[in-house]
Image (cartoon, coloured by chain):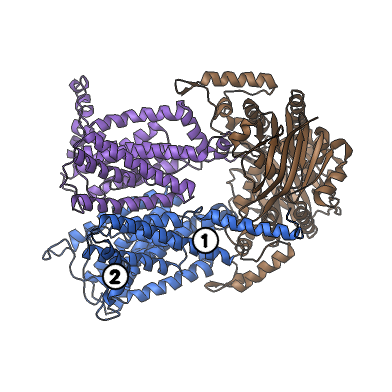
C-alpha cells in the first residue's frame, strides 16, 4: 500500500517534469534570451526575499480555493463556482470595510465572516439546482461565475465607486478592516495564518468527522451512500455550501490583506487555479498547500520572466494544462505499474511451484 | 474426432495482481459440445475472454486447426470463426434487433445504411437457424430469452464455427433452458463446435460430450462426460465434496415482522411491475422469493428497502407503517439489505474495508466523540468483523476494489449481518462468488434466522432458494403466483412451471402467506 | 412598450440568427461527442483557439478561407489532444476538458502577444472576414427576407450542419456505431468496433464543428480576436445540447433560445438598464433553461444496465 503512495508521488513528479521540459522548449523557441528567461523563471523567486514572499502571498488565495474545490470534488460535485464566490467574498468585505466602523481585529474578522457566508449562500445555488432539479452543476456554476462577476462589478461601480480615483475602483477601506502585515517590509499578511488554520480544520473535517465521511462516501459511490442511509442530497448541498464559505472567506482575506480598496476589473482567476491545486493535491487538504505553493511559484517565476525578459507569463498555462492532464491520467505510467505487478506475481508462482519455472 | 482448437500454456495476470489463469492447456474437438466448468473465479470466463480477444494473456498460444493464431481483438477472433455469447448481453437497447445484428458489418448503399437489406439478412438468418426473432423490435423491449437468441444470431452471422456460451442458462427458466439445448444440438448437427461455460453440473451432464474442469486458475482435468458423475466433477472443482445440501434445523417462525400489503407499482417506463403483491415474513423464518429475473423482484426489494418510492400499497414493519420512511429510518428500525448489485450499491470500491464496514452506523454515538469520530473504535470493529467473516485482506485500510468477489461480498455481509437486524433482505447473496464464501454466508443466514431474524431471500439460483428457504413464494409478471409453506415438498419442475406463468395457485392458497 | 417593439422587428430576428450561429456549431459538436459517450468540455477552449488562428492565418495569407482552414485544423488538434489524454491515458474527460480550456485561455493570450504584440486584442493584425451572402430570391420576401438573408456564410453552413448531423447520426454506419458506443460500449467492442477509435472520430468531429463556431466569432460576428471572446459560449452550447436531448432538431431549437437571450441582451443596452444586468441575461437564461430541461427529465435512466 505504501507502494501506491510512492508511485503516485513519482507520477506527479514525472508529470511536472515533462510539463516543464515542454515549457522550456517553448521558451527556447520564443525568446531571444532563453537561458536568461529560464533562470528568471526557475530561480527568480529565490533571488530576493520580496519575491519569495510574493510566492507565499499568492499561495494564500490558491490554498483557499484549492480547499474549497477539494471539498466539492470529494463529494463528486464538479462545482467550479469558487471563482465567483471568491470574487463576491471580496465584494462583501469591501462593503463591510467601507460602510462600517468596528474596532480593529473585530472589523476584519466580521468582514471575513460576511465574505464566507455570502460565498456559502451563493454556491448553495448550483447545489440546490442540482439536488432539486438535477441541473448539471458544472454548467450552472460556470454560468453563475459570469453572473456574479457582473453583479459584483455592478455593486462596486454603482454604490462604492471612488469617483476621484482614476480607474473604476472602490473607496478606500477603513483601515480598521485591513489585515496587518505579518512580516514588515513584505506584503505577507496574517491571512497566511488563516490559511494554515483552514487546512487543519478541513483536514479534520474531511477525515475525522461524520460529515466529512459522508461527503467522501457520497463522492466515492453515491448509490452506496444512499443505500447505506446517508442523506445524499443533504450532503451534496452542504459540501458545496462549505466550498462556497471557504472560497468566500478566501476572497475577503485576499482583499483585506493585499489591497486597500477593491481594484479588480475582471475575475482574478484564482477559482480556476483552485481546480488545478485540487487536482494536483488529489483533493487531499494536506497536499493542498504543496500544490498551491508549486503553482504560485510557477506564476511568480513566470511573472518575473515576463517582466525582465521577452517571454509572456501565459506560458504557465501550458504547464498547468499538461500537469493536470498527466497527473489525472490514470494510464500514465500504468504499463510500468502493470509490469511491476506481473513480475511480482510471476515470482510468487515460481516460488509456489518450488522453483520449477517450466 | 479431431482437435479443432488448442490453447496452450495460457497465463493471465490482472493489474490488481490476481492470477486468473496459470499455464492452462485447453483443447476442443471439432463438432463437439465441450463444457468448461469451475466455480466463480476459477478462470473459465477469463480463458474464454482471451480466446475471444477481449483480454491478452501474459504468455501462451492459441492454435486453430493446427496453425497458430494471434488473437489480439474480437475482430481477429471473429475472423477465425470464434463467436461469443456473453453472460451480460452485449446489445444496444435503443437499436432494433436488425440494427444490433448488423452492427459493425452494416449493409450500405451509397454510404448510407441499407435498412431494408439489414432486415432481410436478419429474417434469412432467423429462418436458417430456427431462432425466431422480430427484426424491427427494439431490443429494449425484448424478454431475456429472446435477447439471447439475438446474441446467438449475431455470432452466427459473423461466421462463428466455434460458439462460446458463457453461463447461458443463468437467466433462463427450465423450459427456456430445454429450448436452448435443442438449439445447441441443432447447431452441433450442423457442424458447429460449442464451448459451454457453466457451473450447473446437471446441465453440463445433460448437454456436453466432454468436460474440462478448472480450479483456482488451473486446468485440473479433462473427461468424457459419460465417464464422470456430478460428484466427481464437483470434487475436482473444489478439491473436496461440495456440500450441495445445506444443514439446517426446522424453523420456528414467530410474529410477523414485515407485512407487505397490496403493493402496486408502475416503473419509469410505464410498465406495471408489481400487481397486488401481499405477503408477510415472520421472525425466525427464511421466506424465499423464486422467479426468473425481471418479474418484479428487483422493484419489490427496492421498495421495501427504501431505494424506490412506494406509490400504492403499504409496508408494515413490526406494526409500524413505513411507507415514507427514509432509508436511514428503515435501517434504524432494523432492516438490513444485502443488495443484488454489490459493486453498485453494496460497497464504495475505492474506499477502504473499514470505511465500507461502518457506512450504516458512522453517525451513531458509539463511534463519535462530540465533533470527531472515534477512529480506534472503527479499527477495532473492522478487525473484529474481518476475523469473524474471514475476509481475506492485508489490512482494514486496504481498498475494497483489491479484494476478490467473494471477499467483497463478505464485507457487505459482515456489515449487514452485524447491525442486529430484525429483517434481513438478501438479494442474490451468493451470486458470482466462490463456494467457501457461499457456505459461510449461508451458514450465517441460518444463524440469524435461529436468533429470530426474519429473512427475505431473493435468488435466481434455484438450488439456493430451494435449499435455504423454509417457505417460498413465486413471482411471475409482478404477481405472486404461488406460496409453498414447506419447500421440501416442492420439485424443481413444479417450481419452473409457476416461474414461467404456466401454473398459478388460487387466491386462497396464495393468501396463506399472510399471517397477520 | 419599447421592448416589444425591439423584439418584433426584423432586425431582431436577424440578430437572433447571428448570435445563435456560434452556439449552434458548438452544440452540434456536443451532440456527436455526447452520443459517443464522451463529454467535450473543451468546446469553449476549442472555439477560442479556432478564433485566434483564423485571425492570424487570414492576416498573414490575406485569405479568409485559409484562415478558416487554420481555425478548423486548430480545433481538430485540440480535440485530438483531448482524445489522446482521455482515451489513451485515461484522464477524466471533464478534467482534461477543463485543462484544455485553461490552456486555450492562457495560450491564446500568449500567442496573441507574440504575433500582435498586444495582450488584449488583435487589431494590429489585418485579418480577413468571411463573406456575407444575400440569398437571391429570399431577400425579396417581406419579413422573412431581412431576417434570413444577408448573413455570414457560416450562419448558413450552421443551419445546413443541423441536417448533416442528423443524417450522420441516423443514416450512416458511423452514426450507428457512435450511438452504439455511447449507449453500450461493450456491445460495440464485442462486434469488433473499436470503441476508442469511434470516440476519437466523434471528438474530432465535435472539435471540427466547434472550430467553425470559433472562426465565426473572429471572422464574421466581429472581425478581430480579443481575449476570452467566447465568453462561455462553449458551455452554453453544452446546456443547449442537454436541453435538446442530444437530438439535432432539439439542439437547434434550444440554441435559438440562447441566441434570443443574447440578442435581447445586446439590444437592451439601449434602454436604461445597467449594462451589467443586461450582460447577465444570457447566463441567467442558460441556468433557467438547464433547470427546466433537467427537471423535466425526472429520473430517466440514460445508460440502460442489462441484468
Question: In the image, is residue B418 above or below residue B41?
Answer: below
Write down the quadrant of residue A54 in the picture: bottom left
Write down the quadrant of residue A25 in the picture: bottom left
In this view, the residue in front, A51 or B379, is: A51
> Which element is circle 2 on?
helix
On the image, the x and y values in percent for residue B242 come to: 84, 50
Question: Does residue C274 appear in this view?
Answer: no
Host chain of mark 2: A
Task: Report the chain shown in blue.
Answer: A
On the image, the x and y values in percent for residue B365 come to: 60, 70
Quadrant location of the N terminus of chain B? top right
Question: In the image, is residue B52 above or below residue A46?
Answer: above
Task: Report the chain shown in purple.
Answer: C
In this view, the residue in front, C156 or B470, is: C156
Q: Please give the label number shown on residue A44.
A: 2
In this view, the residue in front, C183 or C284, is: C183
Label 1 sits on residue: A216
Write down the quadrant of residue A296 in the picture: bottom left
> Which element is circle 1 on?
helix
Residue density around tag 1, few if under 14, some if 14–19, many if 20 or more, within 10 Å: many
Amino acid at each position: 500500500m505504501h507502494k501506491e503512495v510512492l508511485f503516485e508521488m513519482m507520477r506527479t513528479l514525472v508529470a511536472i517534469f515533462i510539463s516543464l521540459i515542454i515549457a522550456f522548449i517553448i521558451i527556447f523557441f520564443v525568446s531571444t534570451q532563453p537561458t536568461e528567461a529560464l533562470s528568471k523563471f526557475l530561480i527568480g523567486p529565490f533571488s530576493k526575499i520580496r519575491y519569495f514572499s510574493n510566492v507565499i502571498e499568492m499561495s494564500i488565495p490558491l490554498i483557499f480555493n484549492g480547499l474549497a474545490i477539494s471539498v466539492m470534488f470529494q463529494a463528486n460535485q464538479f462545482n467550479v463556482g469558487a471563482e465567483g464566490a471568491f470574487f463576491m467574498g471580496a465584494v462583501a468585505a469591501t462593503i463591510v470595510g467601507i460602510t462600517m466602523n468596528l474596532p480593529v481585529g473585530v472589523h476584519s474578522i466580521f468582514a471575513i465572516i460576511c465574505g464566507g457566508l455570502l460565498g456559502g449562500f451563493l454556491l448553495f445555488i448550483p447545489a440546490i439546482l442540482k439536488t432539486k432539479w438535477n441541473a448539471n452543476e458544472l454548467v450552472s456554476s460556470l454560468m453563475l461565475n459570469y453572473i456574479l462577476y457582473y453583479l459584483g462589478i455592478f455593486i462596486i461601480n454603482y454604490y462604492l465607486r471612488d469617483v476621484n480615483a482614476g480607474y473604476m475602483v472602490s473607496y478606500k477601506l477603513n483601515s480598521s478592516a485591513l489585515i496587518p502585515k505579518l512580516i514588515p517590509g513584505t506584503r505577507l499578511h496574517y491571512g497566511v495564518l488563516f490559511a494554515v488554520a483552514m487546512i487543519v480544520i478541513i483536514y479534520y473535517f474531511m477525515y475525522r468527522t461524520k460529515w466529512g465521511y459522508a461527503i467522501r462516501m457520497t463522492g466515492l459511490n453515491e448509490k452506496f451512500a444512499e443505500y447505506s442511509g446517508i442523506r445524499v442530497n443533504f450532503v451534496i448541498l452542504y459540501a458545496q455550501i462549505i466550498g462556497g464559505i471557504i472560497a468566500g472567506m478566501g476572497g475577503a482575506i485576499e482583499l483585506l490583506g493585499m489591497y486597500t480598496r477593491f481594484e479588480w476589473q475582471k475575475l482574478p482567476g484564482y477559482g480556476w487555479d483552485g481546480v488545478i491545486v485540487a487536482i494536483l493535491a488529489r483533493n487531499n487538504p494536506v497536499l493542498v498547500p504543496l500544490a498551491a505553493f508549486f503553482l504560485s511559484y510557477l506564476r511568480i517565476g513566470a511573472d518575473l520572466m515576463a517582466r525582465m525578459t521577452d517571454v509572456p507569463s501565459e506560458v504557465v498555462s501550458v504547464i498547468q494544462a499538461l500537469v493536470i492532464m498527466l497527473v489525472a491520467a490514470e494510464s500514465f505510467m500504468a504499463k510500468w505499474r502493470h509490469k511491476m505487478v506481473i513480475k511480482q506475481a510471476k515470482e510468487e508462482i515460481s516460488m509456489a511451484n518450488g522453483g520449477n519455472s517450466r | 474426432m479431431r482437435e479443432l482448437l488448442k490453447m496452450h500454456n495460457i497465463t493471465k495476470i490482472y493489474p490488481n495482481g490476481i492470477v486468473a489463469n496459470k499455464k492452462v492447456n485447453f483443447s476442443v474437438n471439432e463438432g463437439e459440445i465441450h463444457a468448461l466448468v469451475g466455480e466463480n473465479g476459477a478462470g473459465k470466463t477469463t480463458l474464454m475472454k482471451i480466446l475471444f480477444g477481449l483480454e491478452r494473456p501474459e504468455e501462451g498460444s492459441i492454435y486453430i486447426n493446427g496453425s497458430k493464431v494471434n488473437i489480439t481483438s474480437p475482430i481477429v477472433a471473429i475472423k477465425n470463426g470464434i463467436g461469443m455469447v456473453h453472460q451480460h448481453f452485449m446489445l444496444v437497447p435503443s437499436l432494433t434487433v436488425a440494427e444490433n445484428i448488423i452492427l459493425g458489418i452494416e449493409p450500405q448503399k451509397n454510404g448510407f445504411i441499407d435498412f431494408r437489406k439489414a432486415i432481410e439478412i436478419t429474417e434469412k438468418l432467423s429462418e436458417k437457424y430456427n431462432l425466431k426473432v422480430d427484426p424491427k423490435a427494439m431490443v429494449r423491449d425484448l424478454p431475456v430469452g429472446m435477447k439471447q437468441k439475438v446474441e446467438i444470431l449475431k455470432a452466427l452471422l459473423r461466421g462463428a464455427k466455434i460458439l462460446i456460451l458463457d453461463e447461458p442458462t443463468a437467466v433462463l427458466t427450465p423450459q427456456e433452458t430445454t429450448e436452448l439445448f435443442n438449439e445447441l444440438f441443432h447447431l452441433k448437427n450442423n457442424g458447429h463446435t460449442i464451448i459451454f461455460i457453466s457451473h450447473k453440473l446437471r446441465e453440463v451432464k445433460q448437454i456436453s460430450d466432454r468436460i474440462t474442469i478448472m480450479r483456482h486458475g488451473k486446468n485440473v482435468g479433462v473427461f468424457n462426460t459419460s465417464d464422470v458423475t456430478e460428484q466427481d466433477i464437483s470434487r475436482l472443482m473444489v478439491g473436496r465434496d461440495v456440500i450441495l445440501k445445506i444443514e439446517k434445523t426446522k424453523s420456528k417462525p414467530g410474529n410477523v415482522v414485515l407485512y407487505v400489503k397490496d403493493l402496486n407499482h408502475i416503473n419509469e417506463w410505464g410498465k406495471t411491475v408489481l400487481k397486488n403483491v401481499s405477503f408477510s415474513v415472520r421472525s425466525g423464518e427464511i421466506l424465499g422469493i423464486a422467479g426468473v429475473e425481471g418479474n418484479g423482484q428487483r422493484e419489490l426489494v427496492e421498495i421495501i428497502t427504501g431505494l424506490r418510492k412506494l406509490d400504492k400499497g403499504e409496508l408494515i414493519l413490526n406494526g409500524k407503517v413505513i411507507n415514507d420512511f427514509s432509508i436511514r429510518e428503515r435501517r434504524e428500525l432494523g432492516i438490513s439489505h444485502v443488495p443484488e448489485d454489490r459493486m453498485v450499491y453494496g460497497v464504495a470500491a475505492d474506499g477502504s474495508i473499514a470505511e465500507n464496514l461502518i457506512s450504516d452506523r458512522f453517525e451513531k454515538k458509539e463511534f463519535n466523540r462530540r465533533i470527531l469520530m472515534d477512529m480506534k473504535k472503527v479499527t477495532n470493529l473492522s478487525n473484529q468483523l474481518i476475523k469473524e467473516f474471514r475476509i481475506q485482506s492485508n489490512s482494514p485500510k486496504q481498498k475494497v476494489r483489491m479484494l476478490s468477489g467473494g471477499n467483497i461480498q463478505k464485507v457487505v455481509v459482515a456489515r449487514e449481518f452485524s447491525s442486529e437486524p430484525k429483517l434481513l433482505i438478501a438479494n442474490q447473496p451468493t451470486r458470482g462468488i466462490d463456494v467457501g464464501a457461499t457456505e459461510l454466508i449461508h451458514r450465517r443466514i441460518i444463524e440469524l434466522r435461529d436468533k429470530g431474524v426474519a429473512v427475505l431471500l431473493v435468488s435466481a439460483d434455484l438450488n439456493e432458494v430451494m435449499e435455504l428457504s423454509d417457505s417460498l413464494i413465486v413471482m411471475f409478471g409482478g404477481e405472486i403466483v404461488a406460496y409453498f409453506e414447506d419447500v421440501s415438498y416442492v420439485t424443481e419442475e413444479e417450481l419452473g412451471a409457476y416461474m414461467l406463468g404456466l401454473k398459478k395457485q388460487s387466491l386462497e392458497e396464495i393468501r396463506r402467506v399472510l399471517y397477520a | 412598450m419599447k421592448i416589444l417593439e425591439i423584439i418584433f422587428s426584423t432586425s431582431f430576428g436577424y440578430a437572433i440568427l447571428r448570435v445563435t450561429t456560434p452556439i449552434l456549431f458548438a452544440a452540434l459538436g456536443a451532440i456527436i461527442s455526447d452520443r459517443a459517450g464522451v463529454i467535450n468540455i473543451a468546446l469553449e477552449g476549442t472555439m477560442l483557439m479556432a478564433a485566434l488562428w483564423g485571425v492570424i492565418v487570414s492576416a498573414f495569407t490575406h485569405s479568409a478561407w485559409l484562415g478558416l482552414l487554420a481555425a478548423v485544423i486548430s480545433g481538430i488538434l485540440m480535440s485530438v489532444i483531448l482524445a489522446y489524454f482521455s482515451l489513451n491515458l485515461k484522464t477524466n474527460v471533464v478534467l482534461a476538458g477543463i485543462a484544455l480550456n485553461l490552456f486555450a485561455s492562457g495560450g491564446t493570450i500568449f500567442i496573441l502577444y507574440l504575433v500582435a504584440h498586444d495582450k488584449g486584442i488583435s487589431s494590429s493584425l489585418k485579418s480577413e472576414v468571411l463573406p456575407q451572402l444575400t440569398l437571391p430570391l429570399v431577400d425579396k420576401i417581406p419579413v422573412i427576407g431581412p431576417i434570413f438573408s444577408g448573413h455570414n456564410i457560416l450562419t448558413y453552413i450552421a443551419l445546413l450542419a443541423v441536417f448533416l448531423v442528423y443524417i450522420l447520426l441516423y443514416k450512416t454506419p458511423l452514426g450507428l456505431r457512435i450511438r452504439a458506443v455511447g449507449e453500450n460500449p461493450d456491445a460495440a467492442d464485442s462486434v469488433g468496433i473499436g470503441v476508442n477509435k469511434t470516440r476519437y472520430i466523434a471528438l474530432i468531429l465535435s472539435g471540427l464543428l466547434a472550430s467553425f463556431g470559433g472562426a465565426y466569432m473572429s471572422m464574421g460576428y466581429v472581425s478581430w480576436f480579443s481575449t476570452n471572446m467566447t465568453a462561455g459560449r462553449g458551455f452554453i452550447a453544452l446546456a443547449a445540447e442537454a436541453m435538446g436531448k442530444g437530438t439535432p432538431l432539439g439542439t437547434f431549437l434550444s440554441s435559438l433560445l440562447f441566441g434570443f437571450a443574447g440578442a435581447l441582451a445586446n439590444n437592451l443596452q439601449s434602454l436604461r438598464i445597467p449594462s451589467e444586468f443586461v450582460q447577465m441575461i444570457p447566463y441567467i437564461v442558460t441556468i433557467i433553461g438547464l433547470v427546466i430541461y433537467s427537471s423535466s427529465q425526472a429520473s430517466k435512466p440514460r445508460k440502460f444496465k442489462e441484468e
